[in-house]
Amino acid sequence: MDFDYLRFLAKVGAAYIHPHEKKATDILIQELKLKHGQKVLELGCGTGGTIVRIAGRFKVKMYGVDKLDEMLAMARQRIRITGLPRRVCLFKGNLSALPFGGATFDRVYAESVIGILSSRDIEAVLDEVYRVLGGQGCFVLNDAIWKKSISPEQVQVINRACLEDFGLLQASEAAWSVDDWHEIFRRHGFQVQSFLIEECLKPGNRSLQSAMNWRDVASETLSKAYKISGYLNRGLLFEKKKYSQLLKQHQDDGKYIESRIFVLSKN
């Protein structure tokens, strides 16, 4: 996987790069149940949208890891303009070999990151998360997974096309449904709860944290500025048109996917 599409999204300042975007992020933040003084790690921190949203609301120490220079460059800029450099530390690294000691963190989270890794990398990342989490810690994921109705053959066809067009998988390389994911998480020592994001978004089901503060405004202004600049850059404009066309070709892929929140606690 070369992650070409993610590199493009970084260049145009995109944040909340997952189904249901900021609403799904707010559900994830609620499930983290953050407390003053905790250490929190984001796997695949991207352009830093969620880190800023958390660090701007809670007195916690934030850490982020990503493997793409383009993502980290945008995240650092976002953190700087929102006045959070002292509360956020970013690292370039591989999620299957985290640069932290054991039991370092109270909370770990990831958004549409674990599900697009290879099966072998997923197993390694789960081992690493278990290692760096403290005894009362939890790992919260917002991810898109395959519905039970899809066949392994359909998974292979869709993922092969996504790798060719975007440089990443649509979802797990195996046809893992929610039951498979639960079993994998348990095998790595976690107790598991999960629920559909769509259910949470139904009217009256959940009160989402949506009030804007000045850091949110600054963060969104940065994203909008880079989006506008993309229309003025011939190279980025070409990429935008290319990916817009490809996304239309892949729009039916979504009917095989469900978006879930997983809450994993150490046994």
Image: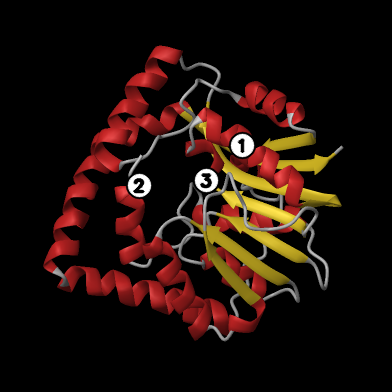
Residue of label 1? 124
Residue 158 rendering spot, x and y as whole percentages: 34, 26
Residue found 50% across the figure and 57% down from its top:
66
Residue found 19% across the figure and 63% down from its top:
236
Which element type, helix, strand or loop, lies under badge 1?
helix
Residue 71 rendering spot, x and y as whole percentages: 42, 63
The quadrant in which residue 259 appears is top right
Q: Nearer the viewer, residue 225 or 185?
A: 185
Which element type, helix, strand or loop, lies under badge 2?
loop
Could you tell me which quadrant the C terminus lies in?
top right
Residue found 74% across the figure and 32% down from its top:
188
Which element type, helix, strand or loop, lies under badge 3?
loop
Q: Nearer the viewer, residue 129 or 11?
A: 129
The quadrant in which residue 57 appears is bottom right
- Give whichever of discs 1 and 3 has the lower sequence position: 3
Q: Are marks 1 and 2 in contact (CB under 8 Å)?
A: no
Residue of label 2? 3
Residue of label 3? 113
